[in-house]
Amino acid sequence: MGFFFEVLIGGLLSGVLYALVALGFVLIYKASGVFNFAQGAMVFFAALTFVGFQALLPGWTGLEEGSVMVFWLAFILALASMIVLGILTEKVVLRPLVNQPQITLFMATIGLSFLVEGIAQAIWGANVRALDLGIADEPIGWILDSADMIVSSFDVFAAALAGILVAALALFFQYTKVGRALRAVADDHQAALSIGIPLQHIWAIVWGVAGFVALVAGLIWGARSGVQFALTFTALKALPVLILGGFTSVPGAIVGGLIIGASEKLAEVYIGPFVGGGIEGWFPYMLALFFLLVRPEGLFGEKHIDRV
Amino acid sequence: MLYREAGQFKASYKEDQQIFPIRQDRVGMAVILAIFFLAVPMFASEYWLQAILIPVLIFSLAAIGLNILTGYAGQLSLGSAAFMAVGAFGAYNFMLRIDGMPFIVALILGGLCSALVGVAFGLPSLRIKGFYLAVATLAAQFFIVWALVKFPWFSNHSSSGVISAQEVNILGFAFDTPVLKYLLTLAVVVVLALLAKNLVRSTTGRRWMAVRDMDVAAEVIGIRPMRAKLSAFAVSSFYCGVAGALYAYTYLGTVEPEGFNLDLSFKILFMIIIGGVGSILGSFLGAAFIVLLPIFLNVFMHSVFAGSLPAGLGSNLELIVFGGLIIFFLIVEPHGLARLWTLAKDKLRLWPFPH
């Protein structure tokens, strides 16, 4: 039984990482109705930019390598680049495509993901880079002693960080003026416009926030498995998470992420051996597919009503 | 002057419904076919045939397949490469396991296998649409490639699922040189493209378009969405499957499941976006564009940087150019290259006296 829980907890914790990526999708989809396929590329770009600045900064400023100062400076610079990227995307790509069918916007973001991946690697190079957040990735002692289970301290840290992030976002949406405007825009573009909410501003802010979430996700992913191109594929796993949770729901993204993470690990361990293993790659998609047949709008999504 | 319909009267329904109703189009088509069937094999070098013409033709076929599904029936799919893989491995197994299997029959059977798989993965489209469906087709993409690697029966127990295509032999005549392979590919593509062109202006095609434009309204006027959507999935996968089989038999010779990855699916999607969504001509233009662009970029980079090429910049530049072009086309010309031809036709009609 201990083994089962170990797999389950490992899955849940990796699910937190999927949820972080999915969160970025949900934010943009809620506010602008754009399904941003490039979120994965943005995660990659953010992580690469952070690592790049972290390596360059000591040379530029004379600060000590690996110091806290360098970390935060790199973080701020990477965040600034993400916000610039988000605003540019909104201005250059999405504004000319206003009122186009959603499918067109979706395809445009596929193009965007190629563009962002290409630019990121052209600037920072295509090598795998290590990212050290200074958190040890080793089993927590007292859990190992008392329950004989291996639970990585890094995973727990990532989960805690994700929790804080979600709570902060929830507070931001609920209690700030900008947050209220964001929710209004998400509800109804035209009504929001008519009471004087500047739509373009709001979209720029949303892309900025999504960039911030991408940066956090990129840092955690990068620290876990190195900053490399494969990050963009892992980010694809956020898609079934969205389907499970519903495109418009922040809690849905979290719950969906946990379900996907746990079920793929459990499936790999308990079903995998019967069919030759390696089913982690497609299991989440199949799970999402069957889920869609039963509940097309996801766990927490809004029910869609067709009108002629 | 040259391209005028004036004086070409249609005196019967049959004439009105011809596939190319304007005489100049018919002549033009005949000339193009003559060039590709006769002149190209005589003058093209082996490099051109193998590295450019054959892949362009094969990708055109795959793009037609995706265009039927996405452009005509409005169901976005990110799994075209997987359906190509099914076609390739299907044809391979029919050739391998049945003695004296004629190549053309194996090709069609491979396509039919792919159509069956396509219908199975198209079932969710009855309940979900838009990008929900796109994600569902990702399941097809990952699952099929995984299954082809994991079950050694499909690749006749070769290591990591690599298959080597058998010799292509039709009625005792071996298609073994690039020229012959090119002609075979061309013949298959021409026949299937004409079929597709006809299909999309038939009742079936009109049903697809009705479902694409508004499925609820289509249902109200008596079109069964289930049949329309599933038939679109079947026909589209059939085309992709045949393209995949040709990919294995006349282009590469040796293929592995991993070769039919998500990148290839995206490439085919880009072809129809750049060529023109909902256009058979566009599928050809888009395929030619996407196949030629990396070659052109490569040549261009080498002439500019001549030897001092920074490592890896080429592939990054390709990504940037592809991504940029997609966005550019979607913003500036959402109907793609095919639309440019339509515009040119309107200009030609009045040329050289526009007033």
Image: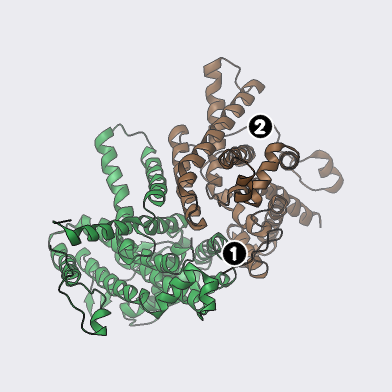
Q: Residue A229 — which label?
A: none
Q: Residues within 10 Å of mark 2 (few under 14, many from 20)?
A: some
Q: Colour of chain A?
A: brown
Name the subunit of mark 1. Answer: A
Q: Residue farthest to the right? A: A146
Quadrant where the C terminus of chain B lies? Answer: bottom left
Q: Residues within 10 Å of mark 1 (few under 14, many from 20)?
A: few
Q: Identify the amino acid type marked 2.
A: Leu
What residue do we see at 53% from left, 33% from top?
A84
Q: Nearer the viewer, mark 2 or mark 1?
A: 2
Q: Is residue A30 visible in this depiction of the protein?
A: no
Examine the rendered structure and indicate whether residue A121 appears above or below residue A73: below
| Residue matched to label 1 | A276
Give residue B83's quadrant in the image.
Answer: bottom left
Q: Which chain is green?
A: B
**Residue A266 in picture, x, y percent from top left:** 70, 59
Give residue B95's quadrant in the image.
Answer: bottom left
Q: Identify the amino acid type marked 1.
A: Gly
Name the subunit of mark 2. Answer: A
Q: Residue A133 — which label?
A: 2
